[in-house]
Amino acid sequence: MHPSSFGQMAQTISNERGRGPVSGTAVGKNGKRKPFLIDFYSTAVGKKYVMAITGIVGIGFVVGHMIGNLKAYLGVINHQGGRAYDVDVYGEYLRELLVPILPHGYFLWIMRLGLITAVLLHIHAAYSLTILNRKARPVKYQSARDYQIANFASRTMRYTGIIVVLFLFWHLADLTWGWFNPGFEQGAVYRNLDASLSRVPVALIYIVANIALGIHLFHGVWSLFQSMGWNNPRFNQWRRGLATGIATLIVVGNVSFPIMTLAGVIDYDATAVTQLEELSE
Amino acid sequence: MSHLNNITIKIWRQSGPADSGRFESHLIDEISDEASFLELLDILNETLIESGLEAIAFDHDCREGICGTCSLMIDGRAHGPERGTATCQLHMRKFSSGDTIVVEPWRAKAFPIIKDLMVDRAPLDRIIESGGFITAETGGAPDANLIPIPKPVADASMDAAECIGCGACVAACPNGAANLFTGAKMSHLNLLPQGQAERFKRAEAMVETMDEYFGSCTNHGECEAACPKSISIDVIAMMNADYLKSKFKNRKSLSR
Amino acid sequence: MSINLDAKIPDGPMADKWNNYKAHEKLVNPSNKRKFKIIVVGTGLAGASAAATLAELGYGVDAFTFHDSPRRAHSIAAQGGINAAKNYKGDGDSVYRLFYDTVKGGDFRSREANVHRLAEVSVNIIDQMVAQGVPFAREYGGMLDNRSFGGAQVSRTFYARGQTGQQLLIGAYQQLARQIGLGNVNLYNRMELVDIVNIDGRCAGIVTRDLLTGEVSSHSAHAVVLATGGYGNAFYLSTNAMACNATAVWRAHRKGAAFANPCYTQIHPTCIPQADDFQSKLTLMSESLRNDGRVWVPKSADETRAAADIPEGERDYYLERIYPSFGNLAPRDVSSRAAKRAVDAGQGVGPLKNGVYLDFAEAIGRLGEDVIRERYGNLFEMYERITGENPYQVPMRIYPASHYTMGGLWVDYELMTTVPGLYCAGEANYSDHGANRLGASALMQGLADGYFVLPYTISNFLSGLLNKPIPDTGHEEFKKAETAASDRFKRFLSIGGTRSPDYFHRELGKIIWDNCGMERTQQGLEQALSEIPALYEEFKTDLRVTGDGESTNQTLEKAGRVEDFFELGMLMCRDALTREESCGGHFRAEHQEGDGEAKRDDENFAHVAAWEWSGDPMAPIRHQEELEYEVIQFQTRSYK
């Protein structure tokens, strides 16, 4: 008698054979369990935990990434006997992390793999939950809804999320793989940045995408407290403020790069630095 | 006492679960502002019956906001435009002459339409049956004052226990999720000392039963705004926390 | 079926009767319990607690509710609290005192042995409900809080905000839900009882109508419990829920169950007055408001000014004037009648001049608005939501309304009706409240019956049926009842008149309220007894039920319930007419003291009037169960 799957329910709407009584609905529910993580991930609440945890990883990344990028404003520094853009040095430093425990670049790859896993899990959970939610209301309301609390951010998560993912690919292709970057030089962060963002359409892509990211974070940061079950009257009133703060920080920080590039504050000058060839000599 | 004039009611009619349904419009020439919204439907129904037409089916009972039977989507809001109020306590003075009021049944896969505005909310009962109780068979209870319960704890439990089981949270949720209902029912019991013995078994069973029928929570907060008892979405966070813990606590015990 | 009114009161001193009963009743061995099937109709406090407990004991239970879920029953609407002789306050409470207060409050028209048992088990109820997680109000030390209630000099009322009924029902419902989940209870929802079937001199089962499909079917069992609530909706306007009805008890009555004291109905003094003709129900405001509110009406019947503009000298604080010692806290029946007198004299207030003021201006001036908000905030909000008036600024308007029915199916000490195997619990039975129920005692009685009485007494009957099969629903008695029920609903559909069932219900309610409400007279009752049958005839020829009988049809459901109210209404008036005295909720204008107080006649009416169905609703047969008071002596209630 117990409902075995979504869609087959011990409900009371009659069928042709009439209606039977409701009984034994909780019998046989604790059958064999799947391994812990899969079992946990199989419920919507579990998936929301995964979304929240991977979201935290993502937030950590974008905040760190943005702060690291601020080094672009520090210009040129003395480095290993030469002159180099601070941000380029920072980029190289990331590859050197945990050397010599790990070989050069390994730790960065570990972080990258972690990040990729988090993004994939975040997307998978979001996709499965979206499908679940669509199925949970197969017939939509036939009249207009009058939402009270749900805001633009909360209701556009899947769209801002898609924008961010598409941007992620563009961003990698542009500044990591250099496919769309004229005269791309591996490791010359400052040069590549300037080369890319000096183009107005590209600058616009960055601005739009980062505003989408901010909107995504505005709901996501608040929401993760609920999903993680972090609930305490002492800090509950700070959750919304924190979400607004992080979203604003990311948008202001990241949007500043294209604007400052267009404004000429970020402006690559090949003569100001010691070229790699010179250093290697 | 004054009256409202020319109210148009655009109301959902559906002859049964298999019918596709449609809106039907009725003009109410005059109605007292003292009338409740359901009394407006009573009057409309009486007119329909006396002119040989079938009355509009809708669920309702106590009409004092406590039984949780009434369930209407009015102008795009579960239980209508007044916060913290069930449909039965919504009065016509909240509307104006000339208004068009759109009335729909609650829609969710878990709440199939029985007829017109009536839906079947049985899955909410399934959630309770799976674990929304404290096992205390009649007769063996110790003295009621044996376990002191701090007043703030009793109050917090009562805040959650006020849930009337109407399903407005599901109706209002853009995802058709029942997390507010389940969270409220679970928090009511999980906060109390008496509820500790089965706390994590309960959390696991209720969440997993909920999962069979409903959508997921994306923390919009629409449920709290629609709840006639204004139950806080804090109960959802409490449920989530207990569900995670249940996966560890239950593994520790060698009960299965 | 002849009527046997042997109450089967156990031997021994009053305080030992229940223990003696339990010591000597016949039991059913645990392994034999599963051989029995018990039907429980209704899932309110009494029904849900009985069904859950019987299932826990091992009996097979079929539970029926006409709601979508067992949690909707009208027990849920009780606000105030539940009494129990716990004496946690150490203020002199005891089982005896609760017993005494209940008998006295019931105006000496209840059965002592039943009331004593009720008081005894009251303490177990609180223990049980707390164990199940009912979040009763607590003090800061963590102990249970109590409040005081009318008719008692001790604080013995346990409460959960203003929603005690809701919390207790949720507790009982959750316990029932557990048994449903475990497969020990079969729950039939949206299923209405339409008849009772007796075979070989005992109740064999019930006939139900599926409210979703119209299907009529039979269900048999070794015993049937009716826990289907009161009949206050006979008045049309009452504080009862819309679906509350008397069909189950009335169908049982027609099949041989005696109906006891139908004229005992309770009027609650503080409800929001009717606002217009189409009002569907009345809303109760907790009686606790009378602790700080002052009741008054203008002295002049021609008063047109707003309340605040009426000078003190032109106001009549009639409760304080007539009952100086109890004042605004005079008991329910007394203050209700006083309000009626004021309104009848034309001094009523509000647009329809159908209420009296309950004024908090003095209390707000004395205590400040914050204290009043702290005490009654949620009630004030509810009042404003319903009336659109702010009671902090203008006085509330209140008027009495039908609220509870003390009458019901006659039951013996074991809660068995005059039909063997048919039990009745909760408000549905002629219960432990006599002619008047004290506040916070309804929840107590419903749970006492379901948790701590029926599960014991039912085995005494079932043990005699061991190894007897469940009656066959193919039996001709079942088939006859099914056909009769189907025909009845077909008849409603085929009348094709001009008026809806609601119209007839409203008209019927007016007749009963005007003549068999707060104050009854011989002339009025006789008039009602000629008007009701006339309206009933009109109902039979002019009713219009649209829709069909094969799908959900609320109009059709209503028609059946209204028809039963017609017949019950006749019995209520008949009973009120023959009870030539005033007691509790029954006030006969001919029987009053010079000062308007009720005049009881213990010599001629210290009995239960148990009515037998004769086939003609206008000619029921009256039987009497004499009430003997061993412990408490008759005395006159006075609140002056």
Image (cartoon, coloured by chain):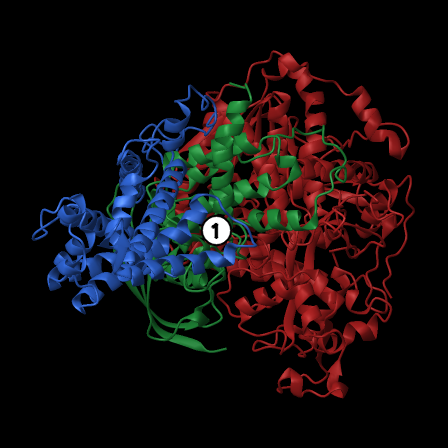
Chain colours: A blue, B green, C red
Relative image position of residue C427 (x, y in whole percent): 66, 44
Label tally? 1
Q: Is residue C254 visible?
A: no
Tell me: residue C527, above or below residue C595.
above
At 88% from the left edge and 50% from the top edge, which residue is drawn? C91
From this view, report whether residue B51 is shown above or below residue A108: below
Q: Residue C301 placed where, x, y %?
A: 67, 83
User: Toward the viewer: C168 or C51?
Assistant: C168
Q: Where's residue B84, x and y in %?
A: 49, 60
Nearest to the observer: residue C46 or residue B171:
B171
Amino acid bearing label 1: Ile
- Label 1 secondary element: loop
Q: Is residue B149 above or below residue B133?
A: below
Using the image, determine if residue A40 lies above or below residue C367. Answer: above
Residue at 27%, 48% in the rendered image: A80
Left or right of C501 in this view: A107: left
Give the labeled residue for mark 1.
B233
Chain containing mark 1:
B
Dot 1, how many residues are within 10 Å of its Cα: few (below 14), some (14-19), or many (20+)?
many
Note whether residue C17 is visible.
yes
Give residue A150's quadrant in the image: bottom left
Whether residue A141 sits left or right of residue C427 in the image: it is left
Picture residue at 65% right of the left edge, 32% below the top = C423
Q: Position of residue C506 (x, y in %)?
A: 52, 60
Extreme-left residue of the structure: A182
- Between C117 and B166, the one lying in front of the other is B166
